[in-house]
Image (cartoon, rainbow, N blue to C red):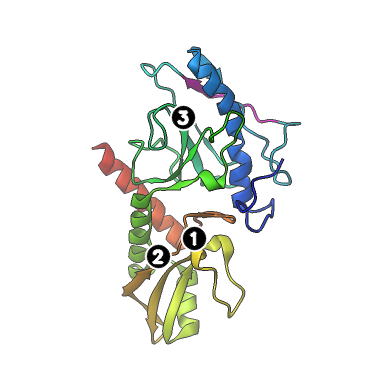
Amino acid sequence: MRPSAGVLRRGAPYTEGARLWRLATLSRSVTTCTRQYCNSPSRITLPIASSRANSFCSHSKRLQFSYYYSTDTSQPTSTSFSDPIRPDLFYHLLHPPNPLSRAVPAFALSFLSNRPPTPISSTIIGWLPAQAPGEEAEAGLNDFTENPDFRDLLHEAIKQGLEEDVDDIQRNGAMQLQEGWMHIHDARNVPALGRIGDPDDILATVRVEDGKILPGTYSPMPAYRLCTADGITQLTEGLARKLYSVLEAKARSEKA
C-alpha cells in the first residue's frame, strides 16, 4: 500500500510526513464508520494503526484505540490521541459539520492535547478528512488543509520568541552570521551547512547586525507550508516552547 504519487515527495517512510500518512490510514476505520454512520449506530470503536516506524501501515499489530466515535451528538465524546512517534502532535476527531464537510468527520491537528475550543480555532494547525472522495479512498497528505489563522499565530509566536531571545539555535546562528539576512528554518528539514533550505521549509527571514537578530525585521516566507513530505511544522526547542505558551493562551481566550 503506497500513497499517491507526489504526496510524499521524498518517499522516505521514516519522515513525519510518512507517519502522518500512515496514521491517516486510521481513516480506513473511519471510512467504515462513515458508512455505518449512515445507518445510525449508537457507538463505533476506532482502532489506531500500529506505531512501528518501519512501516506505512501495519495491520499485524494494532494499538487498541479505546475512545469511541459517537453518532449521538447530544452526548459528545472526547476522541483525541497523540501521534505515537511524535507525541507533541495530537489528532482530534471532529463530528460533522466541520470545516471540511457537513456530513463526514474530520481530524483537527494540534500541538495541544486538549480538544480545540471550536472546530475553527486558531490553535488548529489544519484539518485532515476522515474519508477522501471515493468509496474506498483514504485521506492522505494531499488532503490536508492548512488553517490560515494558525499560520498567523505561528509567526506571531516566533517573532515574540525572537524578541525575548528564547532560542539558543537562532541566537547562535546570528552570532555566526554577524551581518546579513538569516533564514528561520523549520527543524523538520534542516539544510546542509552553508546551503539554503527549500522555500516551503523556510519560516521567515530576519536581519542580523553585530551578531544580533533584529526582531522588527521579521519577514514571513509566503512559500512556507505547514505540512510537507517531511511532516507538520517543527520548531527549534526555544521557539517550540514559546509557540506552545501562545497556543495555550489563545485557547483560553477563545473559551472565554
Q: Quadrant of the N terminus?
A: top right
Q: What residue did someone put label 3 on?
A: 105
For mark 3, give the secondary structure.
Answer: loop
Q: Quadrant of residue 190?
A: bottom right
Q: What residue did someone put label 2 on?
A: 222
Q: Quadrant of the C terminus?
A: top left
For mark 1, give the secondary structure.
Answer: helix
In the image, 32 versus 202, the foreground residue is 32
Q: What residue did someone put label 1 on?
A: 237
Q: Considering only order in the chain, which callout, 3 or 2, is on the residue closer to the N terminus?
A: 3
Q: What's the CA distance linking mark 3 and mark 1?
A: 33 Å
Residue type marked 1: Glu
The secondary structure that most of the magenta stretch takes on is loop
Q: Considering only order in the chain, which callout, 1 or 3, is on the residue closer to the N terminus?
A: 3
Residue 201 position within the rendered picture, expressed as x and y whole percent measured from the top left = 51, 64
Residue at left offset 56%, top offset 38%: 139
The answer to whether residue 192 is visible is: yes
